């Protein structure tokens, strides 16, 4: 029976490349997004490459929706061996005038949804010695003055705040699950080609990030690495 990877926040960049990489290595792939058309088309494209895949729709900032989704993934594809989280929200760009709903959304997608997914999949993850939680993160989350200045300049303060919270969550999960489930993140330092952040000057290939995740999954050593 093949292993299953749940890709949370499926889109045209890193998550697509991760789905293709792990699928090519024999994983069944669960594609998850709020946008039904995106995951349906993505699953069909993977199936055309000989990869077993299925689409799932969920609000990834809502714990109830996420937990219902995990149950559906398990029923359709079997136990979940890897959780890969690339989901993010771009709300609350200016924290000084953002309403509470926007702040909640950006934090919930980054952390609440990820944590709920891990909680619900934990029974599967703990049964597999090669299981993993692999998280895509961004350099705006670093505690660094230049990163802070860029977040303000780019009107991405909410994303920076969420990335920092996610960075801490990764570390906490890694410590708590030490010896049971491998947890690691890739901090992406720049724009990824073909994504919403690509204004024509992106320098990072999504496949490079996906390959890094595959290397980390195999080595099971690094908590956090950077690309870019």
Image (spheres, rainbow, N blue to C red):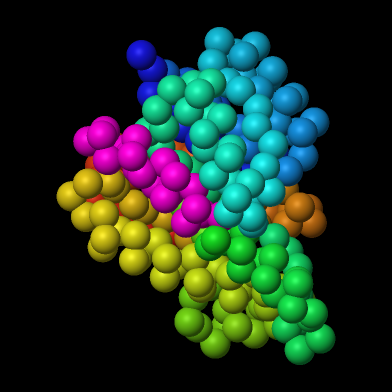
Q: Give how far across and how far down residue 207 sits, in percent.
A: 54, 38
Q: Give how far across and how far down residue 46 sits, in percent.
A: 62, 20
Q: Give how far across and how far down residue 80 sits, in percent.
A: 41, 32
Q: Residue furthest left?
A: 179
Q: Residue at x 42, y 70 (%)?
A: 168
Please say whether residue 212 is visible from this viewpoint: no
> Which quadrant would residue 123 be assigned to in this image?
top left
Question: Where 158 falls versus 177 (above or below)?
Answer: below
- Observer-nearest of 177 and 27: 177
Q: Residue at x 63, y 37 (%)?
A: 32
Q: Residue at x 59, y 38 (%)?
A: 69
Question: Where 58 falls versus 113 (above or below)?
Answer: above
Please say whether residue 158 is visible from this viewpoint: yes
Query: Which residues make up the magenta segment?
Result: 113-133
State the quadrant of the N terminus: top left
Question: Where 51 falls versus 88 (above or below)?
Answer: above
Residue 118 within the magenta-colored segment of the rendering: yes
Residue 126 within the magenta-colored segment of the rendering: yes
Number of dots carrying numbers: 0
> Which quadrant would residue 124 be assigned to in this image?
top left
Q: Give how far across and how far down residue 189 sits, in percent.
A: 54, 63
């Amino acid at each position: 029976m093949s292993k299953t990877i749940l890709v949370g926040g499926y889109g045209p960049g890193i998550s697509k490349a991760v789905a293709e990489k792990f699928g090519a290595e024999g994983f069944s792939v669960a594609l998850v997004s709020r946008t039904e058309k995106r995951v349906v088309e993505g699953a069909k494209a993977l199936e055309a490459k000989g990869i077993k895949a299925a689409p799932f729709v969920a609000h990834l900032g809502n714990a109830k929706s996420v937990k219902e989704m995990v149950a559906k993934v398990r029923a359709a594809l079997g136990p979940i061996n890897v959780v890969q989280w690339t989901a993010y929200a771009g709300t609350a760009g200016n924290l000084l005038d953002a309403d509470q709903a926007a702040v909640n959304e950006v934090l919930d997608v980054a952390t609440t949804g990820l944590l709920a997914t891990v909680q619900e999949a934990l029974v599967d993850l703990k049964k597999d010695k090669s299981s993993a939680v692999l998280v895509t993160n961004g350099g705006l989350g670093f505690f660094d003055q230049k990163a802070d200045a860029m977040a303000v300049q780019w009107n991405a303060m909410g994303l920076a705040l969420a990335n920092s919270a996610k960075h801490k969550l990764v570390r906490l999960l890694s410590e708590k699950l030490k010896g049971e489930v491998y947890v690691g993140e890739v901090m992406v330092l720049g724009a990824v080609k073909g994504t919403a952040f690509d204004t024509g000057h992106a320098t990072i290939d999504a496949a490079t990030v996906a390959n890094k995740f595959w290397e980390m999954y195999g080595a099971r050593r690094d908590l956090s690495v950077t690309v870019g």
